[in-house]
């Protein structure tokens, strides 16, 4: 299949896709899920290419793999686990059976416990040792930070609960910066860690406990925990009443939908949190039922595969024209790169096509004044993914929102159209002549023919945020299923962790660096000389 796709690419790679873009293509190369719309007409994928990509889904058995995931099969084969974050948003769906037992009653019981706790914190029935909680600090990293931090920012217009802060980095500047302005007596600290062993999180949690113990008589009573490891949360001193557990079939980077989303629920309330879950559930239903040519996650995945594995474009820019989604690129970096940044197939053989792309980005219009220069005129093609809402939340400033939308549409148009040498000459013909005109014009040429997709939606509500996140999760699933890799383990993070543990005593001067390479020894020496 890859060969057929490559052969097709060879025959079309030099054409300008703008020449294909009539009204028929605009309608045909777009799809909707509810009122969310994906436009992929501004790509070089044609009907033949798309059919070949659909064939790729069939050859890879993606439908069967999708059904196995939803049914609770252990598709995370290297860890022998099911992959069931979808169960966390299965609000009124069918039973989901793992190892012979329906997991849904426990999922719903935990959601109800979270709601009861969040409501009590928000209305002051549960209070801190200095009165009603004013602030919440979520201590976690990776999936135990990026999801809630991204979502709390995204749903800022819906906040009516305590202020939420996030501490992730082991760099003491992070926790010191957050705690500095807080009153421990009215601060709730949430330790979010699936394993409750992650060194950054446990170090920060101990720091927070020491800070708390200077101000209140019962520091642990100001804490809550989100984890699969109740024995460890108990050992840390957190009451089981304040522990919200989940199962190992929820991957860290997929865990926002359950207890790891507690800070979001505290910020926006149980009803908005449920609306967020409903959005995810709606995308699940769409993903399971829609034909491939109407299936947003499958189409988004196929566009990604076309650009990365077939065209050879190694990166993908995510560009939300929605400032509330400012943390989405960082969130997607973990979701996509920790899931699909792998070179070994499920069966242990090596991948013979590139692994998932480098994902990066910033909100528009900020990025326009930073890195868009490279996207428009650099020698590497960067496929772009634009996200844009029809409406913001500031009705009185709607004209500003319209300017934002115009900028978003202008960028995808500019990337596609470019500017020819003749057009560039015409731009500066009144200022220059002769050789200088040629030189100046050359700098103003835009190659164009640069692909993008646009995801648009009415407004960034909790429901729509749920749709967006589930859309990306399933896109990652489809890409991983086509590549035949395991999107749900993360062995690539292990080696660095092991070496950091071994290097800690060396950095502290308790152990010798003798068995290290010359570069590492020199770095340790330099940093020790300067006071590490
Ligand atoms: O090191 C990678 C990782 O395991 C991520 O997959 C995970 O989201 C993060 O660390 C945090 O893990 P935990 O929630 O167990 O602290």
Image (tube, rainbow, N blue to C red):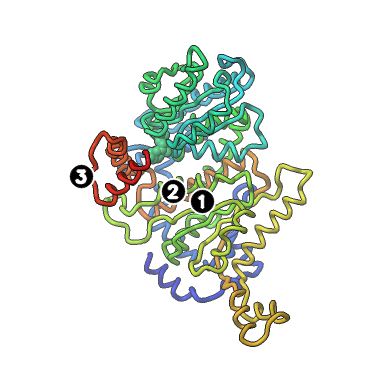
Residue at mark 2: C-beta within 8 A of ligand 1: no
Is the residue 205 above or below the residue 342 in the image?
Answer: above
User: Residue 502 placed where, x, y %?
Assistant: 27, 38
In this rendering, would 148 be left or right of 510? Answer: right
Q: Quadrant of ligand 1?
A: top left
Q: Residues within 10 Å of mark 3 (few under 14, many from 20)?
A: few
Q: Secondary structure at mark 2?
A: helix
For residue 72, which quarter of the picture?
Answer: top left
Q: CA distance from mark 1 to mark 3?
A: 48 Å
Q: Which residue of the protein is positioned furthest toward the front in this rendering?
A: 529
Q: Which residue of the protein is positioned furthest toward the right in this rendering?
A: 396
Q: How many marks?
A: 3
User: Residue 255 placed where, x, y %?
Assistant: 47, 36
Report if residue 522 is visible in the image. Answer: yes
Q: Residues within 10 Å of mark 1 (few under 14, many from 20)?
A: many
Q: In the drawing, what numbered circle is on residue 477?
A: 2
- Asked whether disc 2 touches disc 3, contact meaning CB atoms under 8 Å apart, the reply is no
Q: Residues within 10 Å of mark 2 (few under 14, many from 20)?
A: many
Is the residue 212 above or below the residue 481 in the image?
Answer: above
Q: CA distance from mark 1 to mark 2?
A: 9 Å
Report if residue 83 is visible in the image. Answer: no
Which residue position holds label 1?
Answer: 297
User: Residue 408 placed where, x, y %?
Assistant: 65, 57
Q: Secondary structure at mark 1?
A: helix
Q: Residue at x 32, y 42 (%)?
A: 494
Q: Earlier in the sequence, mark 1 or mark 3?
A: 1
Which residue position holds label 3?
Answer: 515
């Amino acid at each position: 299949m890859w060969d057929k796709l490559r052969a097709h690419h060879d025959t079309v790679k030099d054409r300008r896709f703008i020449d294909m873009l009539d009204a028929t293509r605009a309608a045909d190369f777009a799809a909707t899920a509810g009122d969310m719309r994906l436009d992929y007409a501004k790509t070089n994928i044609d009907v033949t290419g798309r059919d070949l990509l659909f064939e790729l889904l069939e050859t890879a058995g993606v439908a069967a793999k999708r059904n196995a995931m939803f049914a609770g099969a252990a598709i995370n084969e290297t860890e022998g686990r099911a992959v069931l974050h979808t169960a966390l948003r299965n609000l009124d769906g069918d039973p989901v059976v793992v190892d012979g037992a329906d997991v849904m009653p426990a999922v719903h019981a935990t959601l109800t416990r979270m709601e009861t706790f969040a409501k009590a914190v928000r209305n002051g029935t549960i209070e801190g040792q200095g009165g009603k909680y004013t602030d919440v600090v979520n201590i976690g990293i990776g999936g135990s930070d990026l999801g809630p931090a991204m979502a709390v920012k995204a749903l800022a217009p819906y906040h009516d609960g305590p202020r939420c802060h996030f501490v992730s980095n082991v760099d003491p500047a992070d926790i010191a910066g957050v705690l500095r302005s807080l009153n421990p007596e009215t601060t709730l600290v949430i330790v979010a860690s699936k394993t409750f062993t992650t060194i950054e999180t446990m170090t920060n949690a101990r720091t927070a406990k020491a800070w708390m113990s200077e101000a209140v008589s019962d520091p642990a009573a100001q804490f809550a925990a989100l984890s699969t490891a109740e024995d460890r949360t108990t050992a840390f001193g957190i009451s089981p009443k304040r522990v919200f557990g989940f199962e190992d079939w929820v991957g860290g980077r997929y865990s926002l939908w359950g207890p790891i989303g507690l800070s979001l629920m505290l910020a926006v309330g149980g009803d908005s949190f449920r609306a967020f879950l409903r959005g995810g559930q709606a995308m699940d239903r769409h993903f399971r039922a829609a034909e491939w040519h109407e299936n947003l996650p499958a189409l988004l995945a196929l566009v990604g595969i076309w650009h990365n594995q077939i065209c050879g474009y190694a990166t993908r820019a995510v560009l939300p024209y929605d400032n509330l989604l400012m943390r989405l690129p960082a969130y997607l970096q973990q979701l996509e790169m920790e899931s699909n940044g792998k070179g070994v197939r499920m069966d242990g053989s090596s991948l013979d096509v590139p692994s998932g792309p480098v994902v990066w980005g910033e909100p528009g219009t900020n990025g326009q004044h930073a890195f868009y220069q490279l996207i428009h005129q650099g020698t590497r093609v960067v496929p772009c993914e634009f996200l844009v809402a029809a409406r913001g939340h500031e009705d009185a400033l709607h004209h500003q929102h319209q300017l934002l939308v115009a900028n978003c549409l202008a960028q995808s148009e500019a990337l596609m159209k470019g500017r020819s040498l003749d057009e560039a000459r015409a731009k500066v013909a009144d200022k220059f002549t002769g050789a200088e005109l040629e030189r100046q014009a050359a700098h103003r040429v835009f190659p164009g023919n640069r692909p993008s997709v646009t995801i648009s939606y009415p407004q960034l509500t909790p429901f729509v945020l749920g749709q967006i996140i589930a859309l990306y999760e399933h896109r990652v699933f489809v890409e991983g299923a086509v590549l035949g890799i395991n999107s749900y383990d993360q062995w690539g993070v292990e080696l660095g962790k092991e070496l950091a543990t071994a290097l800690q005593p060396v950095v502290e001067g308790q152990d010798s660096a003798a068995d290290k390479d010359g570069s590492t020894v020199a770095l340790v020496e330099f940093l020790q000389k300067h006071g590490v």
